[in-house]
Image (tube, rainbow, N blue to C red):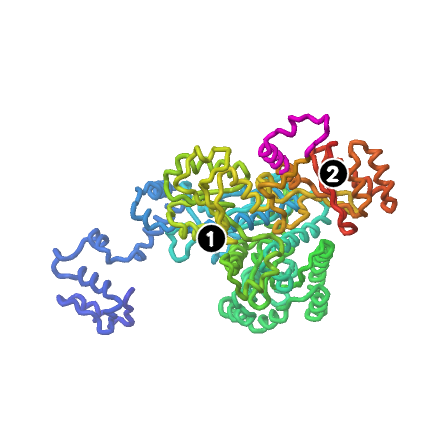
């Protein structure tokens, strides 16, 4: 009924007026709101039968709303939703048989981001540094085995921006919103042999502004430790502490974090649920209330803001909100326990609180044994996605105090594995704890940090402020390659450029060609953008024949420019590699190695370990090998000396001698450095004694080193013999802090 009729008289009067030829409506009829209904009534009451519409015409006119076809629509919807209905199958076939639309293809928005070369290089370096931390703990990469798409899961909050799709069978599927739930699903349905794993993969979010657009893609990095069902429970707090330690080590990688501004925030799901129950929160509201409370301190949200939201959206009383306000604190374990006992005095729920705090205290003990220096506090309301970690520990690594940022979050999700498991007994299911790294926050902050250090040599206050942080752990100055080639004509691409690139690559240098740049200034600008320090300009007159020549030419086909020192050198092809070796401070073998440093060894009285990759001299002050040496030929004027020896060409003698000296110096740069904390007499004896005779070596060296223990002398010999057995010819032995003596030892004599 669109117009109620109160009395019989009103009904009689209204109907009579409608039956007139003019079709008179009541005066209080809402003509504005019911204009469509008025039009339909006038059409149906028209006194001329030819003007009255048929039922089909009225339905097809579009004036009857869909809501007025309730029975028909309900039946149609039920048929579409029912998987056994033929209508369901037909509807799906129609949806998936839509023709290709060029317009939709053009309007489809892809969320692919345009990263610069430097961004990609910086990202690779950061991920490589993280992987070293994971592998140090014995983890293996599990990224390739993760689930790419999975059925929609009810554990996600309706407000989550899930990217959902419909398959041909009518099932609703979703792309991974995080890596924790897909991995827990895998653990609940298959047997995983790996004990510690890390995963680097994408997660997806739907575009709220445009549902037809592609999902937003983000990188997520997770580290997880899995325990089997029959493992002793004593392992659980140990592995919880190890996961937290991994998060702390990840934070220590990045130079922009200060230890004083980072804190580890611990919580336990049992503790959180007990507090909410004590305050009077109903069990049906626990998850949503916990979600709002976990946002305190982030995105400028305060406790007052959260209390207002809880009151408006969930209608929580002021008494309960005031109770919650008392538990908004961050304290260490001892003060936290005292605070709980004061607030929950004589409450029967205090037993559950003590059990949770006891477990957290055990985790903190392990963190102390691991020598984690980061401040550790407990907050009853902390914990992102607490519903994943029911019955287990929750933890966060937080940067900042007032305006906080998440570095990583994690917890133990054994209950989640049980909820997602199928066809397996709960007693046979594994348990797991994991940490999720906030990659986007770390990478974006790292890029901003990199922008502080300009490569044009200018100083600023920020760079001075972070100078010490810049050498914290890793050199974050990434570059595309060691050297770029600048050409002024494409004719050089036919023979000259491939030959030069081949020589540089064979020598262990990374090199590339600058494209589509014909001026020196443009080439230099592109090199600076990619943080490349050296440009090799190839002159247009260079030919493959001149480059392959083994003699020095007066015409130099190359000009090597160092963008740091702003110096140019005119060089020939045979001078290219030696010149680069001098400038980079290493030989081609060193340059092509992973470390880029000469191998060295260190021995001290407390250890018999040979420590590699510890350079004796700093790269910046390392001696550069000269291309020629002073050659002194000692004449033999004896009567019985062979005269032919003194008649050799002096230039030939100089060339061969210079080459021999150069080869020796090159070998010396690769020589291991053995540090022996002892006096000069011991170093001299080591230099003249062959390591091939073990007993004789120990007797002679021990004779002059009476103040050294026999075990230390054995360690010195073992270190030298180990290098000799590898085929190493030369070794450098230095006296360390006790002597300035340095000698060269022939290990193969």
Residue 41 vertical position relative to residue 343 in the rendered view, above or below: above
Identity of the residue furthest to the front in this view: 639
In the rendering, which numbered label is found on residue 528?
Answer: 1
| Rendered location of residue 545, percent (x, y) | 43, 32
Kind of element beneath mark 2? strand
> At x 22% / y 52%, what residue is drawn?
60
Q: Quadrant of residue 254?
A: bottom right
Kindly tell me whether residue 510 is visible in this rendering. yes
Position of 107 with respect to 610 (left or right) is left
State the residue position of label 2. Answer: 745
Asked whether residue 189 appears in the rendered view, the answer is: no
Image quadrant where one finds the N terminus: bottom left
Q: CA separation, marks 1 and 2?
A: 44 Å
Main SS class of the magenta portion in the image: helix
Asked if the magenta segment contains residue 647, the reply would be: yes
Residue at image location 65% in from the left, 30% down from the top: 646
Nearest the eye: 504 or 90: 504
């Amino acid at each position: 009924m669109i117009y109620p009729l109160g009395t019989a008289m009103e009904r009689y009067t209204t109907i009579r007026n409608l039956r007139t030829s003019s079709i008179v409506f009541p005066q209080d009829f809402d003509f504005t709101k019911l204009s469509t209904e008025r039009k339909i009534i006038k059409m149906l009451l028209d006194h001329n039968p030819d003007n009255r519409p048929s039922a089909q015409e009225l339905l097809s006119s579009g004036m009857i709303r869909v809501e007025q076809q309730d029975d028909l629509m309900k039946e149609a919807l039920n048929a579409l939703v029912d998987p056994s209905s033929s209508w369901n199958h037909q509807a799906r076939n129609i949806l998936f048989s839509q023709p290709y639309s060029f317009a939709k293809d053009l309007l489809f928005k892809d969320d692919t981001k345009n990263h610069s070369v430097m961004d990609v290089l910086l990202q690779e370096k950061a991920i490589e540094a993280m992987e070293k931390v994971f592998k140090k703990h014995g983890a293996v990469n599990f990224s390739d085995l993760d689930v790419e798409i999975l059925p929609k899961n009810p554990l996600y909050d309706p407000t989550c921006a899930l990217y959902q799709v419909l398959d041909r069978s009518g099932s609703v599927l979703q792309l991974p919103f995080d890596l924790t739930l897909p991995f827990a699903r895998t653990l609940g349905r298959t047997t995983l042999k790996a004990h510690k794993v890390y995963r680097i993969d994408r997660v997806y979010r739907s575009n709220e502004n445009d549902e037809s657009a592609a999902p937003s893609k983000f990188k997520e990095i997770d580290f997880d430790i899995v325990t089997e069902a029959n493992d002793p429970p004593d392992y659980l707090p140990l592995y919880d502490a190890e996961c937290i330690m991994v998060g702390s080590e990840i934070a220590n990688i990045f130079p922009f974090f200060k230890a004083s501004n980072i804190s580890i925030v611990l919580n336990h799901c049992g503790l959180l649920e007990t507090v909410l129950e004590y305050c009077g929160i109903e069990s049906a509201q626990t998850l949503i209330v916990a979600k709002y409370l976990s946002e305190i301190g982030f995105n400028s949200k305060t406790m007052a803001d959260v209390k207002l939201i809880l009151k408006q959206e969930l209608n929580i009383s002021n008494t309960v909100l005031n109770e919650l306000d008392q538990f908004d604190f961050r304290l260490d374990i001892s003060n936290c326990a005292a605070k709980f006992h004061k607030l929950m005095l004589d409450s029967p729920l205090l037993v559950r609180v003590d059990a949770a705090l006891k477990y957290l205290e055990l985790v903190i003990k392990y963190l102390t044994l691991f020598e984690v220096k980061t401040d550790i506090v407990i907050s009853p309301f902390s914990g992102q996605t607490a519903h994943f970690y029911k019955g287990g520990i929750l933890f966060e690594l937080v940067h900042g105090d007032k305006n906080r940022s998440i570095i990583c979050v994690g917890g133990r999700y054994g209950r989640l594995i049980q909820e997602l498991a199928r066809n397996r007994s709960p007693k046979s299911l594994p348990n797991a704890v994991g940490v999720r790294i906030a990659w986007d926050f770390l990478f974006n902050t790292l890029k901003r940090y990199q922008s502080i250090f300009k490569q044009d040599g200018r100083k600023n206050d920020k760079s001075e402020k972070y100078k010490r942080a810049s050498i914290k752990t890793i050199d974050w100055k990434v570059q595309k390659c060691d050297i770029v080639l600048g050409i002024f004509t494409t004719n050089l691409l036919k023979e000259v450029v491939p030959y030069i690139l081949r020589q540089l690559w064979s020598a262990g240098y990374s090199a590339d060609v600058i494209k589509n740049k014909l001026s020196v200034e443009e080439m230099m600008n592109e090199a600076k953008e990619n943080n490349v320090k050296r440009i090799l300009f190839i002159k247009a007159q260079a030919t493959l024949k001149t480059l392959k020549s083994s003699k020095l030419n007066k015409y130099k086909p190359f000009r090597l420019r160092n963008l740091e020192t702003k110096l140019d050198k005119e060089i020939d092809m045979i001078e290219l590699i030696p010149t680069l070796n001098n400038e980079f401070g290493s030989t081609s073998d060193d340059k092509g190695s992973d470390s880029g440093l000469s191998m060295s060894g260190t021995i001290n009285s407390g250890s018999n370990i040979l420590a590699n990759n510890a350079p004796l001299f700093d790269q910046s002050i390392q001696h550069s090998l000269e291309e020629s040496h002073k050659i002194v030929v000692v004449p033999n004027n004896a009567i019985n000396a062979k005269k032919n020896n003194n008649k050799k060409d002096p230039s030939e003698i100089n060339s061969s001698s210079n080459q021999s000296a150069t080869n020796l110096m090159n070998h010396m740069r690769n020589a291991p450095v053995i540090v022996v904390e002892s006096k000069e007499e011991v170093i001299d004896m080591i230099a003249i004694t062959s390591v091939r005779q073990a007993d004789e070596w120990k007797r002679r060296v021990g004779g002059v080193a009476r103040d050294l223990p026999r075990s230390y002398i054995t360690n010195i010999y073992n270190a030298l013999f180990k290098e000799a057995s590898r085929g190493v010819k030369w070794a450098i032995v230095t006296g360390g802090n006790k002597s300035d003596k340095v000698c060269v030892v022939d290990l193969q004599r």
